[in-house]
Image (cartoon, rainbow, N blue to C red):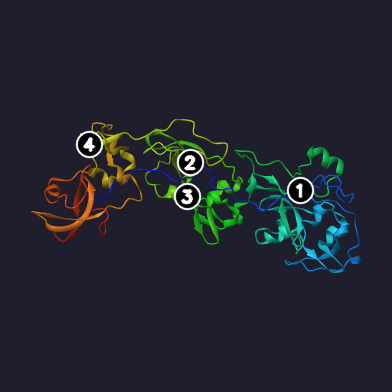
Amino acid sequence: MSRAKAVVVTGLSVCALVACAAPDFEGDSFGDRARSSPGSKSDAVECGGVASVSPEDPEKFPKCACAAGGQARCIPKDKLPNALASQLDACDDGGAGVCVPDKLVKSGGAAPTTCQSAFGEGRCMSLCVPEVAKNGSLLNRGEGDVCADDERCVPCNNPLKGGEPTGVCEIGKPPAAECASTGDATGGGGAALTCPYSGPPVVDVTTFPACGDGARCVPTNLVPASAASLLEACDGGLCAPEKSIAAGGQYLPKTCTSVANAEGRCLNVNIPEVDKQRASLPQDVCDANERCTPCFSPLDGKETGACKTVSCDAPKQPATKFKDCCVDKKTGVGRGKCVPKATVPESQQSKLEDKDENCAQGAELCAPNENLDPTFQAPPCTADNFFQGQYSGVCISDCIKLSFIENIGTSRGNCAKGFTCAPCERNGKPTGAPGCPGG
């Protein structure tokens, strides 16, 4: 009397499963902060990137300490445009000012060294810049450690925000070219990622430790809150599919044919909701570490979210629902669903009705509604039967097939109408009924 396990897919939020990649520089990007309003002080160029200033000899200014390390000078605020000063730590060495990295003081805002980060092309930025220091543990010094010890390779684009430019790659651009390329002075550094993304990996997934087949453990702060609840926790973060990471959250899952020939998407089995039902979901054209998850729940026709993991995706076909079966003759209400026989483990198929008039003979079985819920727990019961005597067990649906011996050895007991109290033991041996020890 084992519980039948047929497919039920629910709980996938209608949002990106993961958009994890480059550090999320909170607030505005460097480029946003560098854009001043008309009439702002200083004749610095400010139509993109970090504003340019006049080059100075760093030795002319007092040193100041950066919390995360790095060489910097305390520059009076009146020598800097507001947009640049707002990005740096305050200091009071020699008067009110801000801590400016030595390289920036000396160059006056020339283009930083180009580097290759785990998140694509970037620029070497000092740890004295608070936004860089905040994400220092996630950023490296670029391939070949081209950045100085007190610098990190900051990516040109932030995949966490759909490839939105961080602004670092606009630093040092010629004013005419910079302003002409931006038009409305919106900064830049590269076009935002399109959906779906196709091209070389935006993020080097090997930066993160593996947490399953085709999945990597990424820091929690790199995953949008809307997607975090969908992913399994791992040591230091959340276990996200490699394909989504590599595409900066703009990966469009492959279309496939799911249960009952319904439209679906290939989703990684490391996603908990997919893993729960991997035995019931077909692989179809998906990779070995994926299962074809339907766009709509076959139980009630509600969207599962599997076909809306990115903004450019949506179901193309209407919902496909399982037909009702084990219909109550008085109320006309179906107490079960016709499920594909292939989704039910072979060891349990004999317990389900295979001759229900509403189901396709030989292709479908009638599974009780409650057994289609992965979280269902059969309620305990007690009963008294002439052959069995007083016994304890669990309530199972009358839609489940019982053998002749099982039928005469069970009673309804204190179960609700339409259910039978199945004993947990018979002749001192476990029956395997769901909810019983060993069931």
Tell me which label, 4 or 3, sits earlier in the chain.
3
Q: Residues within 10 Å of mark 2 (few under 14, many from 20)?
A: many
What kind of element bears circle 2?
loop
* Label drawn at residue 328: 4
* Spatial separation of the CA atoms under disc 3 and disc 2: 11 Å
> Which residue, given by chain and number where applicable, does mark 1 sit on?
31
Q: Is residue 363 above or below residue 151?
A: above
For badge 2, the amino acid type reads Ala
* Nearest to viewer (mark 4 / mark 2): 4
In the rendered image, the vertical position of residue 238 relative to residue 289, given as above or below: below
Q: Secondary structure at mark 3?
A: loop
Q: Give me the C-alpha separation between circle 1 and circle 2.
A: 35 Å
Q: Residue at x 60, y 52 (%)?
A: 205
Amino acid marked by disc 4: Asp
Decide if residue 327 is on the left or right side of residue 167: left
Q: Disc 1 or 3, which lies upstream in sequence?
A: 1
In this view, the residue in front, 240 or 40, is 40
Cα gap from disc 1 to disc 3, whole angstroms:
36 Å
Instruction: Measure the alpha-carbon separation of dots 4 and 2.
Output: 33 Å
Residue 271 placed where, x, y %?
Answer: 47, 50
